[in-house]
């Protein structure tokens, strides 16, 4: 298959690599139909994340069709359309039982190394170097998804990929920011930074009942009228493509 592989600082290439295979009973193989490049991938591209190895397959935001299932997979079947969260979680540990899936302490085989290098460990994650377990990512034609009874979300056929793909990372990330703000009906909410995650935080704020959302940014192309109001960096916005998610 073809996959995007890391070869060094600012050197990523589409390589021909072996197809993934089922390694554990609760694995599935997903045929990727859509994948995204995350802002976090820039840290990998710039070699800011330790433990990357030449040939590592990148990508932690992806969705697709279940192609093959391990014998212990009960929640998915061949042909299911799934969005796969970037976290790999067991579903049974102390943290998973509290829905703190990114803290799962059973799925990252390199957690000692993570603690040594960055002071703490996360769960296993797709496509993010060996500090998060060295799992191959989803910027590829196929990907092995471990712990498939826990993470993947079966999605309906009626919605296009680009309306669902962001459930893999940036929509929940933006939503969680809004949820943490404990927004009450009619509140005025300010969101600093209007990249993709910021835009999801804005839409989530609307969804949670905000009466006014003030979006703050200084990147000209993110402002609706940068030529007419070049000095005005604060404005209200409500991107149409995001609104369509809720209707
Ligand atoms: Zn991401
Ligand atoms: Zn767990």
Image: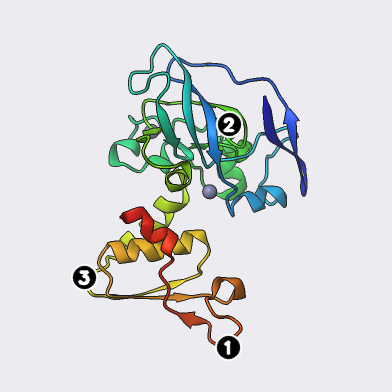
Residue denoted by label 2: 135
- Residue 37, percent across and down? 60, 48
CA separation in Å, label 1 and label 3: 31 Å
Which residue in the protein does label 3 denote?
A: 185
Residue 194 can be seen in this image: yes
Residue 60: name its quadrant. Answer: top right
Q: Earlier in the sequence, mark 1 or mark 2?
A: 2
Q: Is residue 111 visible?
A: no
153 is higher (above) or lower (below) than 215: above
As displayed, is residue 80 above or below residue 95?
above
Dot 1: what SS?
loop
Residue 142 quadrant: top right
Image quadrant where one finds the N terminus: top right
Q: How many marks?
A: 3
Q: Residues within 10 Å of mark 2 (few under 14, many from 20)?
A: many
Q: Position of residue 211 (x, y in %)?
A: 27, 75
The disc, 2 or 3, on the residue closer to the chain's N-terminal end is 2
**Which residue does the image show at 42% across and 18% down from the upper left?**
78
Residue in view at x 45 percent, y 63 percent: 199
- What is the x, y in percent for residue 115? 55, 43
Residue 70 vs residue 43, the one in the foreground: 70
Residue 158 drawn above or below residue 194: above
Numbered badge on residue 231: 1
Towards the viewer: 116 or 62: 62
Q: Name which quarter of the figure residue 213 lies in.
A: bottom left
Q: Check the image and tell me how it is coloured.
A: rainbow
Would you call the spot at circle 1 few (<14 residues within 10 Å), some (14-19), or many (20 or more)?
few
């Amino acid at each position: 298959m073809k996959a995007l592989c890391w070869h060094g600082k600012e050197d990523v290439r589409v390589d021909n690599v072996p197809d993934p295979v089922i390694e554990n009973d609760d694995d599935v193989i997903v045929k990727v139909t859509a994948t995204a490049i995350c802002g976090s991938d820039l840290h990998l591209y710039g070699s800011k994340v330790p433990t990357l190895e030449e040939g590592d397959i990148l990508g932690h935001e992806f969705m697709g069709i279940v192609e093959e299932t391990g014998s212990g997979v009960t929640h998915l079947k061949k042909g299911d359309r799934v969005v796969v969260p970037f976290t790999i979680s067991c579903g049974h540990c102390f943290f998973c039982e509290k829905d703190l899936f990114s803290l799962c302490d059973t799925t990252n085989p390199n957690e000692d190394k993570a603690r040594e290098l960055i002071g703490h460990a996360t769960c296993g994650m797709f496509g993010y170097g060996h500090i998060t377990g060295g799992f191959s990512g989803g910027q590829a034609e196929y990907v092995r998804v471990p712990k498939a009874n826990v993470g993947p979300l079966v999605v309906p056929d009626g919605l296009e990929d680009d309306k669902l793909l962001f459930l893999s990372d940036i929509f929940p990330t933006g939503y969680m920011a809004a949820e943490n703000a404990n927004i009450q009906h009619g509140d005025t909410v300010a969101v600093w930074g209007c990249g993709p995650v910021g835009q999801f935080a804005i839409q989530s704020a609307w969804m949670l009942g905000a009466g006014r959302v003030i979006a703050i940014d200084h990147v000209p192309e993110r402002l609706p009228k940068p030529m007419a109001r070049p000095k005005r960096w604060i404005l209200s916005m409500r991107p149409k493509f995001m609104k369509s998610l809720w209707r």
